[in-house]
Amino acid sequence: MKERLSSASYKAWKSCVTNGTPLGLDTANEIAEAMKQWAVEKGATHYTHWFQPMTGVTAEKHESFISPVGDGKILMEFSGNELVRGEPDASSFPSGGLRATFEARGYTAWDPTAFAFIKENSLCIPTIFCSYSGHALDKKTPLLRSMDEVSRQAVRILRLFGDDKTRRVITQVGAEQEYFLIDRDLYNKRKDLRMTGRTLFGAKPPRGQELDDHYYGAIRPRVAAYMRDLDESLWAVGVLSKTKHNEVAPSQHEMAPIYTDANTACDQNQLVMEIMKKVAERHNLVCLLHEKPFAGVNGSGKHDNWSLSTDTGENLFKPGSTPGKNARFLLFLAAFLKGVDDYQDFLRATVAFPGNDHRLGAQEAPPAVLSVFLGDELGGVVDAIIHEKDFSHVGNRELQIGVDVLPTIPQDTTDRNRTSPMAFTGNKFEFRMLGSSQSVSGPNIALNTIMAEELRQFADELEQNINDFQNALNALIKRVFTEHQRIIFNGNGYDDAWIQEAERRGLSNFASAADALPMYTAGKNIDLFVRHGIYTREEINARAEIHIENYTAVLSIEANTMIDMIRHEILPAVSGFAEKLCVRAGYKQKAGFSHEYESETAREISGLTDALFQACKILEQDLENLPDDPTRAMVYCHENLLPHMKEARTYADRLELLTDKQDWPFPVYSELLFSV
Ligand code: ADP
Ligand code: MG
């Protein structure tokens, strides 16, 4: 932009991004023209406002730059108006009742803080998406609001520490993305993978992840070729992918980009997911982003690395090298701990999706209980402050906030504990409960807003005691650490004993999405978001409704797919195979041979076939009996449909093991998991 804009326009844009000053139409026109030229030089013919509706994926509607100028001639045109505002028909995007159907108009508005990029010959312009009446219908608007709000409150705190330079505090996010790669030909033969993204059937293969040989293992050539192509495709749109490796399960991998501001990071993670799938197609592979594509091996998550930094480049979660910076660090740490403790339920709700239910608490991902891992060193500091005791690492001195220098907290080595849902990793927090397919926007909106609220409370209190700042600060930090120490847990989160301990501590445990989703609209949570202007009451209610309805929709699709596969693939196949066995047993009997295998297997198959048939009919009944009320439907799915699906699966999986490979209607786990 610096190269292609006049310096006045460049400055106007910069000031719009950093200070939020409005952009004039002249400037917008100049930026639009420059963007178009740049895009056309790179082969673009279209532009699209690229936005993030509440479906969790991105949406785009492409317009060509073409505009007729008479005599059958055309010009490639793009105006400031077109850049700044779009007006897609919004009627088919989920709105949770925020938009009456007669008012189908939705508006998209350019987000000048996000980078445009070119994808498949279209100039993609990141935008926000709202209804005619101004309600946010997307995942970007509230994220931007929350970034502003946490910045505002954090700057208040920084001023108290005498920092008069920082104008803005920026949320930084790095999202690690896990995924599976499987062969496309095999994938195409599995209706469950195609319809639901996960296998609904599949007996345990002779080999899973027992050998622990996949994690960080040598990358096989076909996967390596995919990863190289993926890196190049990501770099081309400005996503700085940095780390790649094999994950725990066979066929499972991970990519991590270099962190950036939360807004860009959320855009980029959406792009990452989209590009991962597209690149896979070029390699005759399929990239599975579902949280649990295969039972019995680990599923996929997403780690949301989150921190706050000043526009002068200081990380506020980095323990400092001076007493003042240490005190500041401890205050931000206190705010974070209090925030996670106060809003455990809401944080849990932001990762509540049916797919994620298969992982959380299943010994492969953090438990469904929120807690914060600080590590021994920092945990020791917090402990020393609570009990006003000596802290051995800083010698035999009493630890006084703002006077002592904290021991250096070594980055990264603090945390090789992978079982914590929220781990301090030296200079950032790693929120590890996210599902691999979800947008990272929701969890970051929550983290920002919660942090804003706690910082607001702290600033209110400290501003009142400005004349005795040091003592007020010490007292505040000590009090908050003491009141919220229950949220700190440094042990093994996969241990059942922790769940009991967490209960004793009074931490909340929402085992499933169906339990967690209603927390979206708990009174204190609505108050929080409304107070900070992140969501209106209507907006948050709408979001809860969308997630609740989505739960039922996902489970219904899964159950319908199961029924379809049972009736049209499994039952005919096993019945045919049983017939073959019976015919063979008859021949053998006539010939006077023994026919134990044929008879016994046919008998077991017959029994299981009937059981599967009954289970299928129960699923059909469940679907007919779905309550109309969305919350009741969700609970019904969780309590009835889900266990009935599990039951049907056990019969089918046993049948798979009994049936001739030639007769089984679709590829099995050993083929799918070791196909690439
Ligand atoms: P690990 O797997 O050990 O957690 P990775 O290197 O795979 O580490 O991922 C760490 C992620 O955290 C990367 O995306 C990285 O850019 C990001 N990150 C590093 N520092 C920060 C920070 N200060 N704020 C936010 N994210 C960060
Ligand atoms: Mg990693």
Image: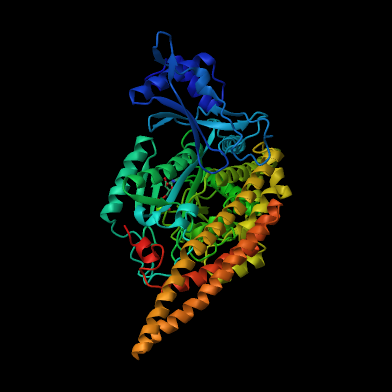
Farthest residue to the bottom: give it.
592
Expressed as whole percent of the image width and height from the top left, the position of residue 269 reads 46, 43
Q: In which quarter of the image is residue 399?
A: bottom right
Looking at the image, residue 476 lies above or below residue 29: below
Residue in the picture at 46% in, 47% down: 175
Q: Quadrant of residue 662?
A: bottom left
Looking at the image, residue 333 lies above or below residue 562: above
Position of the C terminus, as image quadrant, is: bottom left
Farthest residue to the top: give it.
71
Expressed as whole percent of the image width and height from the top left, the position of residue 247 reads 38, 58
Q: Which is more toward the observer, 611 or 434?
A: 611
Q: Which is more toward the observer, 312 or 640?
A: 640
Q: Is 248 positioned to the left or the right of 502 in the image?
A: left
Count of numbered badges drawn on the protein: 0
Q: Which is more toward the observer, 207 or 219?
A: 207
Expressed as whole percent of the image width and height from the top left, the position of residue 341 reads 63, 54
Looking at the image, residue 156 lies above or below residue 212: above
Expressed as whole percent of the image width and height from the top left, the position of residue 325 reads 52, 43
Farthest residue to the left: give it.
221
Q: In which quarter of the image is residue 236?
A: top left
Q: Is 626 positioned to the left or the right of 601 in the image?
A: right
Position of the N terminus, as image quadrant, is: top left
Residue in the picture at 36% in, 49% down: 243
Residue 483 visible (yes or no): no
Residue 141 visible (yes or no): yes
Q: Which is more toward the observer, 617 or 387?
A: 617
Farthest residue to the right: give it.
523
